[in-house]
Amino acid sequence: MKTYVALLRAVNVGGANSLPTTEFVRVLEEMGLGTVKTYIQTGNAVFNANSKEGAGLSQKIKDRIRGSHGFAPEVILLRLDELEDAVASNPYLGANSNPKSLHLAFLASAPGNPDLTALEKWRTESEQYSLKGRVFYFYAPEGVGRSKLFSRIEKVLGVGGTARNWRTVCKLLELAREVAVTGGKLPTTKR
């Protein structure tokens, strides 16, 4: 068994792409995934799956949601070790005191030849960013809501993904470690 984190893009945001947490859990459990735990309503789940199921699992989840809810959100799938690496590689340690200032954009794949300098024309003085593999770290102490750079990340990198703030990433890591320890033996709980 391996522990995975599934991050759905643009679910339950502004009334669009409604997928209640209970239904998301049901979709995953019907796929035979174990010890499913969720965190907040924006499409975050942690679960155990057979190692053989890892390949293509992202697409299978997307297809199941399309079949049951009529829309197909982008599904970014991370193994526990990938999430641990993303947290350990955080270059912006100041985010611990203001966890909403750091967002990690988890990308579908590592960008081939990204031109990060193209982002400079939109960067404010307080914003910082870094790309490590398939994780784009964006530190914005003044928030991302009005950031012109944040809205252009995917276009410049040429790769789709979904972002979570530092608090959410740390909570997902905590849940993933919990699920990994249980090994699928405990009953499902929802948060």
Image (cartoon, rainbow, N blue to C red):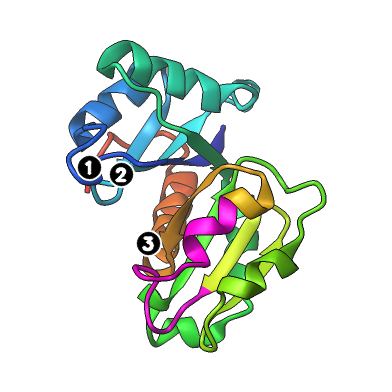
Gap in angstroms between the C-alphas marked 3 and 1: 16 Å
Front in this rendered view, residue 158 or 5: 158
Give the mark, 3 or 1, whose residue is nearer the N terminus: 3
Q: Secondary structure at mark 1?
A: loop
Front in this rendered view, residue 154 or 171: 154
- Name the residue that disc number 2 marks: 38
- Please tell me which residue is depicted at 65% across the width and 74% down the height of the picture: 120
- Name the residue that disc number 1 marks: 190
Q: Does the image show residue 89?
A: no
Gap in angstroms between the C-alphas marked 2 and 1: 6 Å
- Please tell me which residue is depicted at 53% across the width and 67% down the height of the picture: 149
Give yes or no for residue 15 being in the magenta stretch. no
Mark 2 or 3: the one toward you: 3
Front in this rendered view, residue 171 or 76: 76
Q: Position of residue 72 (x, y in %)?
A: 40, 23
Give the quadrant of residue 144: bottom left
- Please tell me which residue is depicted at 62% across the width and 73% down the height of the picture: 121
Give yes or no for residue 152 being in the magenta stretch. yes
Q: Position of residue 39 (x, y in %)?
A: 29, 50
Q: Which mark is residue 168?
A: 3
> Considering only vertical position in the picture, is 149 above or below 163?
below
Q: Position of residue 54 (x, y in %)?
A: 61, 27
> Considering only vertical position in the picture, is 113 above or below 43?
below
Left or right: 132, with 141 as reference point:
right
Q: Residues within 10 Å of mark 1 (few under 14, many from 20)?
A: few
Question: For the magenta stretch, what is the residue range?
Answer: 139-154
Mark 3 or 1: the one toward you: 3
